[in-house]
Image: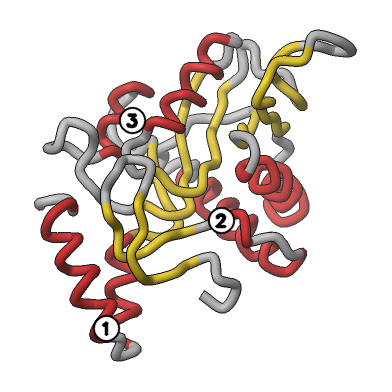
Amino acid sequence: MQLGALKFGTFTLKSGRLSPYFFNAGLLCSGPILYTVAQAYALILTTSTDTTTSSFPHFDVLFGPAYKGISFASTTSLVLHTHHNLTVGFAHDRKEAKDHGEGGILVGATIRDKNIIILDDVMTSGKAVRGSIDLVTREGGKMVGVVQMLDREEVGADGTSSTVKEVESIIGEGPGRVQSILRMRDLIQWLEKNGRSQELVAMKEYEEKYGLKT
């Protein structure tokens, strides 16, 4: 919130839903905040690949969807090396394929025949991450997981199951393949703790309408 990356108000999402909050990961753009974000991604990745609680199998490359995901994948691969002694590559896509030089739609480490984890910022309907999964698969990579910065914890396109479960069904191999650093419930708890009653009411109304029903 200090950076303006998280705002409360009324916002129209790509899905067409009117949301009481909006998250713009593009504003996480300084050295200190990128370092913090990369540490958080790395913690999720290393905790999830522990032999006793493995949600992700071995992974070779972090894929950052253009454009916001590029910095997350690159800085996280660096932190995995310096803090966790793990060597992984990173790759990202272009918005348009290049027809000269090295050509193609991808930049960075090769993904063919490699295990890939996508680092994303936030997904509501999951349309963008599905596009990234399709691209990775089309280019010969094997999808093994997704880590998002914020899980909005909303029902997916079918209006019943969660977007996370829908994406996990595409990846296959059971639950736990889509994880997050923060969740909508964390934002609600923060509002409660800090006495932000007006925003809290709007968030709870939105959660009631679009949130997961457990």
Mark in the foreground, 3 or 2: 2
User: How packed is label 3: few (under 14 Cα within 10 Å), some, or many (20 or more)?
Assistant: many
Q: CA distance from mark 3 to mark 2?
A: 21 Å
- Label 2: which secondary element: helix
- The residue that disc 2 covers is 25
Q: Is residue 74 above or below residue 149?
A: above
Residue at 69%, 26% (x, y): give it.
Answer: 94
- Label 1: which secondary element: helix
Q: Position of residue 156 (x, y in %)?
A: 23, 37
Q: Is residue 65 above or below residue 13?
A: above
User: How packed is label 2: few (under 14 Cα within 10 Å), some, or many (20 or more)?
Assistant: some
Amino acid marked by disc 3? Val
For this orientation, the residue located farthest to the bottom is 195
Q: Position of residue 58 (x, y in %)?
A: 55, 30
Amino acid marked by disc 2? Ala
Can you tell which quarter of the image residue 52 is in? top left
Residue at 45%, 32% (x, y): give it.
Answer: 128
Q: Nearer the viewer, residue 21 or 190?
A: 21
Q: What label does residue 167 carry, if any?
A: 3
In the shown orientation, is residue 31 left or right of residue 171? right
Q: CA distance from mark 3 to mark 1?
A: 30 Å
- The residue that disc 1 covers is 192
Residue at 40%, 46% (x, y): give it.
Answer: 179
Q: CA distance from mark 1 to mark 2?
A: 23 Å
Q: Earlier in the sequence, mark 3 or mark 1?
A: 3
Question: Quick check: marks 3 and 1 in contact, CB under 8 Å?
Answer: no
Q: Earlier in the sequence, mark 1 or mark 2?
A: 2
Question: Quick check: marks 1 and 2 in contact, CB under 8 Å?
Answer: no
